[in-house]
Amino acid sequence: MMPINNKSIQGYSPILHARSEKYFWKGKGALSIKTFKNGRAFYHAGHGHFAVDEGNYLLLIKSEYTNKYLDITWLEEKLYELAHRLLKVNRQVNKEILKLQSLRASTRKELYKRIHIGHEFISAYFDQSITLTDVARTACLSPNHFLRSYKQMFGISPHQYLSERRLQESKRLLLQTTRIT
């Protein structure tokens, strides 16, 4: 059973509701799950750049937040479900880490983090002109090391992923656009 602290955050509303084609956020906050519909939201959080659209979400955890009116049993069930899902994700991440060629496990883990920082950067800024050097710099790697490791991790080059992501967005926009005759 996880202890629950009944802290209130004065002057802070944990719910943001707004409409926009694009939304940019940078800062600190309580537990937050970011989703977006009919557009994209850009977040700079921690050491990464993230774009959130209809196909994914972003979970930000900075400080403890609880609502004293929550049903504790429901919350405990959700926390156990979350723990179960996190274990599944952890197993998958460990399998992916093993794809990277490095002698030390700690090096593979660090490289995995950096490659994903670069991957999220590409996902966030696919609609802008970005270079391999830009992405590698964001991941704190040389362009050659980033390219080689990215291919090991994802089985395609960053350029191939960028092209696929742009094509997906083009398809989405074409399907969303109404015909003018």
Image (tube, helix red, strand yellow):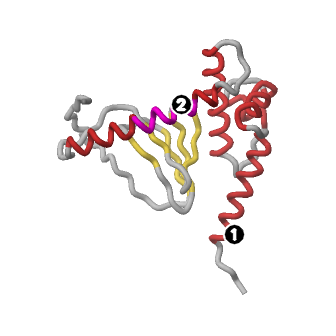
Which residue range is magenta in the image? Answer: 84-93
Name the residue tied to disc 1. Answer: 174
Looking at the image, tell me whether mark 2 or mark 1 is earlier in sequence order.
2
Quadrant in the picture for the N terminus: top left
Query: Which residue lies most toward the bottom here?
Result: 181
Q: Tell me: 52 left or right of 7.
A: right
Magenta stretch contains residue 50: no
Viewer-closest of 159 and 77: 77
Q: Tell me: 181 left or right of 70.
A: right
Tag shown at residue 122: none
Query: Which residue lies most toward the right here?
Result: 144
* Residue name at image x 66 percent, y 23 percent: 111
Residue 90 at x, y percent in the picture? 51, 30
Placement of 37 over or under 161, stated as above or below: below
Q: Amino acid at mark 1?
A: Leu
Residue 109 at x, y percent in the picture? 61, 21
Viewer-closest of 158 and 48: 158
Placement of 58 over or under 92, stated as above or below: below
- Badge 1 marks a residue whose secondary structure is helix
Tag shown at residue 91: 2
- Badge 2 marks a residue whose secondary structure is helix
* Residue name at image x 68 percent, y 80 percent: 179
